[in-house]
């Protein structure tokens, strides 16, 4: 399975309704669309997109799916802030029939998941807002291989022209 990880785009610093309701700002929406355009042009779109229930992640996933012209995301409560890598890997096994799964989530959860998939625990991975990473992983064999980690500025420079 290829597992694409997309960190939510830039969001409001705060919300009157708390962290759960922080919305994307326009830059975050554009980061989400840029990620979709880049993966679409590369022929690397996922078969399914799973997202955290927090507003900024849902909006990131919605913008991504719309720009990629693919079905909308599935909200997964286990992708909320505080996700534990081992629990995420167990949950992802339910999607092992898909060749390529994308998840939209938060830091430091996504970096921790990447490190867990790679079999390292050194704090060396950090996903900035709007970053895209992809790991080749087999639920049956454990550790994976990092295929790429693209910062948002590189994805933003992508044009279909």
Image (cartoon, helix red, strand yellow):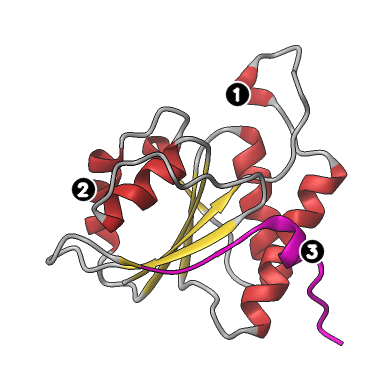
x, y (%) of residue 113? 36, 46
Name the image quarter holding residue 131: bottom right
Residue 76: within the magenta? no
Residue 76 appears in the picture as rendered: no
List the single residue furthest toward the left.
140
For residue 20, the mark is 1
x, y (%) of residue 16? 76, 12
Marked residue nearer the N-terminal end (2 or 1): 1
Q: Is residue 7 left or right of residue 152?
A: left
Counting other residues with Cα less than 10 Å from the Cα at mark 1, is it few (<14), some (14-19), or many (20 or more)?
A: some
Residue 158 appears in the picture as rendered: yes
Q: Which residue shows up at 75% across the image and 18% down it?
A: 15
Instruction: Find the magenta span and give its range.
Output: 146-161
Q: Are marks 3 and 2 in contact (CB under 8 Å)?
A: no
Q: Is residue 122 left or right of residue 37?
A: left
> Is 150 or 31 nearer to us in this picture?
150
For residue 144, the mark is none
Q: Which residue is mark 2?
A: 90
Q: Which residue shows up at 74% across the image and 35% down it?
A: 11
The answer to whether residue 122 is above or below residue 2 is above
Q: Which residue shows up at 46% across the image and 73% down it?
A: 47
């Amino acid at each position: 399975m290829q597992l694409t990880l997309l960190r939510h785009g830039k969001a409001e610093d705060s919300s009157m309704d708390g962290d759960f309701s922080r919305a994307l700002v326009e830059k975050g929406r554009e980061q989400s669309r840029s990620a979709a355009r880049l993966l679409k042009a590369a022929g690397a779109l996922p078969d399914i997109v799973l997202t955290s229930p927090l507003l900024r992640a849902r909006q990131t996933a919605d913008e991504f799916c719309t720009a990629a012209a693919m079905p909308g995301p599935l909200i997964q409560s286990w992708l909320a802030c505080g996700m534990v890598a081992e629990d995420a890997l167990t949950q992802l096994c339910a999607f092992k029939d898909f060749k390529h799964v994308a998840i939209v989530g938060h830091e430091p959860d996504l970096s921790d998941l990447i490190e867990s998939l790679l079999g390292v625990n050194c704090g060396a991975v950090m996903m900035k807002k709007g970053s895209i990473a992809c790991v080749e992983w087999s639920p049956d064999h454990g550790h994976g291989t990092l295929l790429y980690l693209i910062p948002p500025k590189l994805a933003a420079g992508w044009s279909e022209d």
